[in-house]
Amino acid sequence: LGVIIADVPVEKLEELSLRNEVSWMSEDAEVRTLATTTDNTSHIEVATGANKVLPTDVTKGGAGNGVGIAILDSGISAPDAAEFAGYKMVTSGGLLGGGGLLGLGLLAPAKPAPYSRIVQSVDFTGEGTKQDNYGHGTHTAGVAAGTGQASEDYAAKTTGAPTYGGIAPMAHIVSVRVLNSEGVGSVSNVIAGINWAIKNKTAYNIRVMNLSLGTAITQSYKTDPLCQAVGRAADAGIVVVVAAGNLGKDSAGQTIYGGILSPANSPQVITVGATNTQQSIGRSDDTVTTYSSRGPTL
């Protein structure tokens, strides 16, 4: 990505900036997950209309079938193995019917068999674990590609409870852990994760990258190394989706404009705010949540 991470004494920064080979210097700032206490991800498959295109028979594939989604977050720990499971038809290879006429029997019928859609997990936090000790990465992965099985199990025991399904429940998931057990990372952690995803794009068919994280904007996207990194991913053919942030209002509840975080301010990514569906299927009452960051994105 053309980036060097270095520890530099403060008194040497000016001297370093004068060197001809240095085009720009940027702080390795703290990056945080964009978690919020308000959860509006329920019934997203219905409220967005995704349920109208999702097949009911998972053995025939489904939304996102075979597409790799790189989740750059706090890791993924499936609360239920079925939440991130895929299904494929397999046969035992045996015969039924004891041989039958002329010793010929019937092939055993194919049955759907589950497999994990989390095809790879890597860690760039230095904590030495790939588990989601914070919870946000698992949540994000569920919104993107969860089957909804965990919520269906809960709804079966709780009358009136809604079910939750992801938009692309047959996509493959690549967990790129860049936030630690406190939901905190650094710009360099995220850049390292982005760089890994670009290098392994073909191996895992990574066509989508999600970053529900951000840091304060201190410079133009043209010089911001994090924005440059997501731009490189977009140039490599990966659709990059970034959360806008949760700075939509101040402590008094007044609307704030210009609260977009980096790298959501990059013009090469799809910046996503939060929607309040009012827990209804129709879109006529949908609004932007009060906490969702708003533009401009410059």
Image: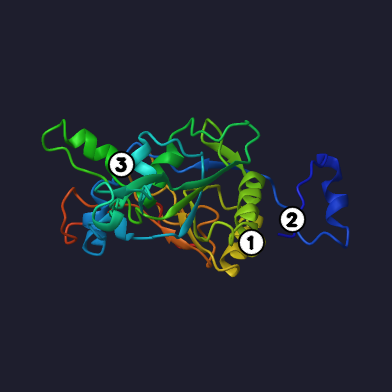
Amino acid at circle 3: Asp
**Residue at the disc numbered 3:** 39
Q: Position of residue 49 (x, y in %)?
A: 23, 62
Q: Report the residue at 23% width, 35% height from top.
A: 153
- Check disc 2: other Cα within 10 Å, few if <14, some if 14-19, many if 20+: some
- Camera-side residue: 264 or 100? 100
- Left of 63 or right of it: where is 216? right
Q: How many marks?
A: 3
The circle drawn on residue 175 is: none
- Of the numbered discs 3 and 1, the one sitting upstream in the chain is 3
Q: Secondary structure at mark 1?
A: helix
Q: Secondary structure at mark 3?
A: loop
**Residue at the disc numbered 1:** 228
Residue 142 in view (yes/no): no
Q: Are marks 2 and 1 in contact (CB under 8 Å)?
A: yes
Q: Residue furthest left?
A: 159
**Residue 20 placement: quadrant:** bottom right
Q: CA distance from mark 2 to mark 3?
A: 36 Å
Q: CA distance from mark 3 to mark 1?
A: 31 Å
Q: Position of residue 232 (x, y in %)?
A: 63, 64
**Residue 155 placement: quadrant:** top left
Q: Report the residue at 41% width, 52% height from top.
A: 293
**Residue 53 placement: quadrant:** bottom left
**Residue at the disc numbered 2:** 3
Q: Position of residue 296 (x, y in %)?
A: 46, 63
